[in-house]
């Protein structure tokens, strides 16, 4: 019998969630996603030191203040990983804008356009790149502007609330990444229930509701479930537009030979009883704020990605100093 992974690929676009592009070849995903934490982990591996070294040389050559050189290096490093990943997949790579810009729409747009320019300089069409932005109100409006004015496709990340999903659909962004496992983590930490079957998992239920809402009302934005803790969560979302999965869980799915059936379908979505809503900024902020889990996990996610970006910058500064001193 086919593996669960091969069965899943019939119903859902499988995406690899990793900066370790050597892990990508084994599982043959369509797309791949990266984030600052994954890039930080990968740059510590000897196999990827050359990409860090090349990015530092680029940053120094670009000139400017130390801070500007570090920013240039970071952008180049993220794009360099993306370029290597694109050699191994037929689809798109997601590259993330610095989480520290999550509340600054204009800076997010400017940084995104710099990243796209670096890809285009390397001969990659912008249609093969998704720009990842935090799903704050400002991030969602940055996504709207990038899509409308610049034809840049966006992947809205750190998405935990239904309000965030509705605002993203109304902004006509390409794709959203609701975080399944981190939602379950919060419920395990903050309620009496310490384990969940896949069909009752709050992260699975959240993504199912969003998928059903998008399909019922014919939104073009697609749903990519992310941040999985176990393969039960993955299989419970079979049929979702895309799922981005870590190499560890891809390996488990490859070894699993249980039957996978599509649990999310457009047909089921059309018959769900969700009401269509519209959110302006005031409504968005209020409805998102009413979801304690989403407020806490969005803030926590931004802080964690920012902390890893700072660790990466510190590593770059040290190496940059060594290069300048001829070491």
Image (tube, rainbow, N blue to C red):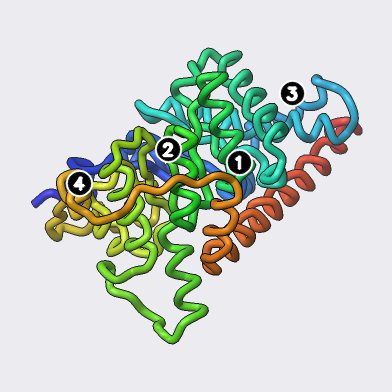
Residue linked to disc 1 = 139
Q: How far separated are the C-alphas under marks 1 and 3?
A: 28 Å
- Of badges 1 and 3, nearer the viewer stands 1
Residue linked to disc 2 = 175
Q: Earlier in the sequence, mark 1 or mark 3?
A: 3
Label 3 residue SS = helix
Residue sitting nearer the eye, 76 or 151: 151
Q: Earlier in the sequence, mark 1 or mark 2?
A: 1
Residue linked to disc 3 = 58
Q: Is residue 79 above or below residue 261?
A: above
Q: In this view, does 192 lie above or below 78?
A: below
Q: How far separated are the C-alphas under marks 1 and 2?
A: 13 Å
| Residue 38, image x, y percentages | 56, 48
Q: Which residue is drawn at 35% across and 51% down?
A: 210
Residue sitting nearer the eye, 81 or 205: 205
Residue sitting nearer the eye, 212 or 302: 212
């Amino acid at each position: 019998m086919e593996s669960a992974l091969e069965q899943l690929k019939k119903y859902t676009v499988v995406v690899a969630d990793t900066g370790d592009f050597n892990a990508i070849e084994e599982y043959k995903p369509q797309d791949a996603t990266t984030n600052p934490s994954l890039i930080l982990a990968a740059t510590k591996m000897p196999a990827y030191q050359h990409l860090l070294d090349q990015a530092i040389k680029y940053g120094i050559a670009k000139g400017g203040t130390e801070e500007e050189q570090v920013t240039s290096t970071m952008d180049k490093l993220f794009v360099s990983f993306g370029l290597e990943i694109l050699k191994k997949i037929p689809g798109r790579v997601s590259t993330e804008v610095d989480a520290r810009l999550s509340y600054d729409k204009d800076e997010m747009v400017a940084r995104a356009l710099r990243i796209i320019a670096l890809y285009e300089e390397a001969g990659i069409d912008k249609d093969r790149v998704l720009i990842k932005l935090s799903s704050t109100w400002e991030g969602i409006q940055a996504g709207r502007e990038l899509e409308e004015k610049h034809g840049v496709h966006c992947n809205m990340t750190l998405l935990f609330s239904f309000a965030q999903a509705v605002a993203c659909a109304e902004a006509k962004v390409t794709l959203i990444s609701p975080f399944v496992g981190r939602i379950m983590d919060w419920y395990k930490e903050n309620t009496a229930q310490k384990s969940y079957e896949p069909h009752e998992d709050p992260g699975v239920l959240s993504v199912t509701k969003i998928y059903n809402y998008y399909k019922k009302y014919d939104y073009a934005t697609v749903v990519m479930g992310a941040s999985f803790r176990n393969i039960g969560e993955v299989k419970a979302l079979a049929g979702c537009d895309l799922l981005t999965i870590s190499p560890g869980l891809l390996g488990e799915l490859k070894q699993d030979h249980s039957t996978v059936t599509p649990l999310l379908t457009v047909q089921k979505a059309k018959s769900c009883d969700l009401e269509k809503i519209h959110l302006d900024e005031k409504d968005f902020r209020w409805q998102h704020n009413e979801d304690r889990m989403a407020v806490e996990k969005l803030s926590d996610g931004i802080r964690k990605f920012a902390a890893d970006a700072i660790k990466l910058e510190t590593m770059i500064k040290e190496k940059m100093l060594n290069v300048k001193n001829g070491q």
